[in-house]
Every structure is written in structure tokens, then in C-alpha cells.
Amino acid sequence: MMTTTFSPTSSVRTSCRDLIRQSGSVSINIPALVKFSNEIAESIHSNQSLQVAEWDADGWHYTGKTYQRRQYQDDDLYELMRMERVALYILSMDAINFCFWPSSSSSAKNGLEYEHLAIALRKVAEIDDISDDRQGHADSGDSSTYVRAESSYALSPSNLTTLTATKLQSLLQPHFPSSSESIVYELPEIDVRCRLLNELGTGLRDHHNGSALNMISKSNQSADALVRIILETFSGFRDYVDRDSWTNKCDACDWDAAKSSTSVIHFYKRAQIAVADIWAALGRCSTSSQRCHFIDMKLITTFPDYRVPQILRQVGALQYAPELAAKVDNQEELDEGGVDEVEIRAGTVVAVEEMVELVKK
């Protein structure tokens, strides 16, 4: 019997579309969506010099531009080492790219945003950028395929595997803005984030010879395949919700069952972001390697978070039933994985998919 390979991006599209067809709380206003799509298309056509933003246009991310290793005489090896370090930075960043707002203070709000974490992690990655240390080598099997990062690199798999929450806090906190009485800058759920980085290091070590580039190479330049590889390797990236757990009050089905279950809603936000970041940083404009130049980037869906639906609702493209609208307008916290949150996220995916097709026309 022939088995079908799991396609995460296809599963996202199909499950979200099926849910919104049955949704009683979230709907798509087609006329408003068409109007908004036309405005975007007109803006694109009227701006002949429109350019796609560079991945690090704001200077937040680690690019390896300051990476120097005088002991590497081979230019190709040197470039592979730089790419490996950037790929590890991206995977580390996207492993912990969630939930910034809670504060340990009852009187001060948390001002931490994505850019603060990205910059702090960049500075951690840059610590050993300039060194004569030979702690790192091309894999003896095939140095043209992959390398392992230096053990001096803070985000190497060996260091991620043994990272503690205390160490992670000490690495990042000094690079956050200074706090005040009314606003603090702190990374919540540090234990959870540390566990996800431990998993990242262990997964790369045990399944991909300790190399991010080796993992990427296994995708054969397919974005969808790399999303699948990330999901298979790292459970922390498995962003799905089992609808049966809503009605039966049971635990969500396990990963093997989730891939084929008709009751599961798939999102895989951070896994898709990681692939998009790798493509933007190392594949879109790279002339040195094709491994990160994914030929099916169009399969990546929108990343369903809390910002995109805000815009879609503001332009009238995404509509909420009165009860849900009241919750959102009153800034009530929606349960993670609950019906309201999942339907908003699914509606976002479906609306953006429709917008893409409309803009292309």
C-alpha cells in the first residue's frame, strides 16, 4: 500500500479552510477582501521601483558579516561556516519566537518585542565572530555539503543541548533595554524557551550530524519538505490543535495521528517562519549555495499570529460574531488553543490565501 508523504503547508490550507466553512464566529467578507486586495495590487503597479525588503533591513538579525576566521584558507569552507552559524541563529530565534507580553511585575508592563530578542540573540551570536580559535571543523565526510559550528559559538548544537535557563537569562538580559517603574524588558517563560533550545541542539546532534546545513540539504530545495523535517525533528515547532479535545475534553492526539487526523487544525507558524527566514537570509540572493534556494516558496502560508487578523479586521475583510467581537474589543484574553483563537487564526490563513490569488490577478 502506497503511503502519502505528509505536506504541512497543504494541511494548513485544507484544515483552515474546512474549519472556516463551519465557523460560527469568524467569517470572511469577500467584497471588503476584494477591495483591500485591489488596493494592494494598485500600490504594487504604481510603484515601479518597488523592492522586496531585505531579511535584515533593520539590522536586528545575525548575518555573519562580521565573522572572521583567518585559519580557514578555503573560501568555500569559510562561507559554509558562516551559513551554518546564520542558520543556527535563525532556528534558535524562531524556536523561542513567541509570547512576549506577560510581566512578572504587577505594576509594570512588559515592553519586550521581537526586535529586542532578535538583537540580543544577534549579540550573543557575535561573541566569537572574530577569533583564531580552531574549535570547529568541516565534517570529515563531505565538507562541500555541511559543516559543524565551532564549539565556541554560543548557538552551536553542543552548547544548546547543555544550556540552562539561568545561562540563557544571563546571555540575553544584558542586551535588553533598561527597565523602569512603568515598563520592564524581560523574556517570559524562560524555562520553556530553554527547553526548546535544548531540543534544537539535541535534534540536530542526533538526527542531522550536528549541522543545520545538513538538515536543510535533506529538503532538496523544497520549503514544504524542510517544514516537514523541522516538525519531525523538533516537537516544539508542532503547532496544531485537535478539535476533538474541545468537545470530548481529552488530550490532543499525538503527532503521528495528527498528521492524518481530520479533526486537527494545522498552523505550523514558527516552522514556516524558520524556513522563510532561511530562504530570505541564505537562499533568495545567495550565489554561493543553492541548498537554501527553495523552489516552492509559494507553498508557504501566512504566519497566523495576532497582528495580521488585526489588520484584516480593520479593513473589514475578517468579521467576528458579536460575542467574539466583544471579547476582542474589551481586550479579553482568549484561551490558547480554544475555539475563538483557533478560528481567528484559521480565518487569517484563508483570508490571506484569497488575497494572494486576487492580487495575482
Image (spheres, rainbow, N blue to C red):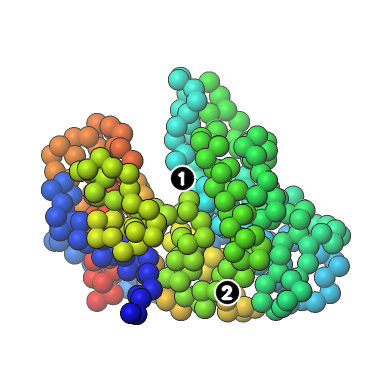
Picture quarter with the C terminus: bottom left
Picture quarter with the N terminus: bottom left
Which label sits in the foreground, 1 or 2?
2
To which residue does mark 1 refer? 98
How far separated are the C-alphas under marks 1 and 2? 27 Å
Query: Horizontal and vertical percent for residue 150?
Result: 76, 59
- Give the residue at x 34% y 80%: 2
Q: Give the answer, above or below, for where 12 lies relative to 188.
A: below
- Give the residue at x 27% y 48%: 342
Q: Earlier in the sequence, mark 1 or mark 2?
A: 1
Q: In the visual, does 291 lie left or right of 12?
A: right
Could you tell me if residue 55 is visible in this image?
A: yes
Which quadrant would residue 71 be assigned to in this image?
bottom right
Q: Which mark is residue 270?
A: none
Query: Horizontal and vertical percent for residue 183?
Result: 50, 27
Q: Which mark is residue 217?
A: 2
Q: Which residue in the rendered view is the most extreme toward the front?
A: 1
**Looking at the picture, which amino acid does disc 1 mark?**
Phe
Frontmost residue, 67 versus 137: 137
Crowd around label 2: few <14 · some 14–19 · many ≥20 (10 Å):
some
Q: Give the answer, above or below, for where 13 lies relative to 336.
A: below
Count how many numbered circles sit on residues in the image: 2
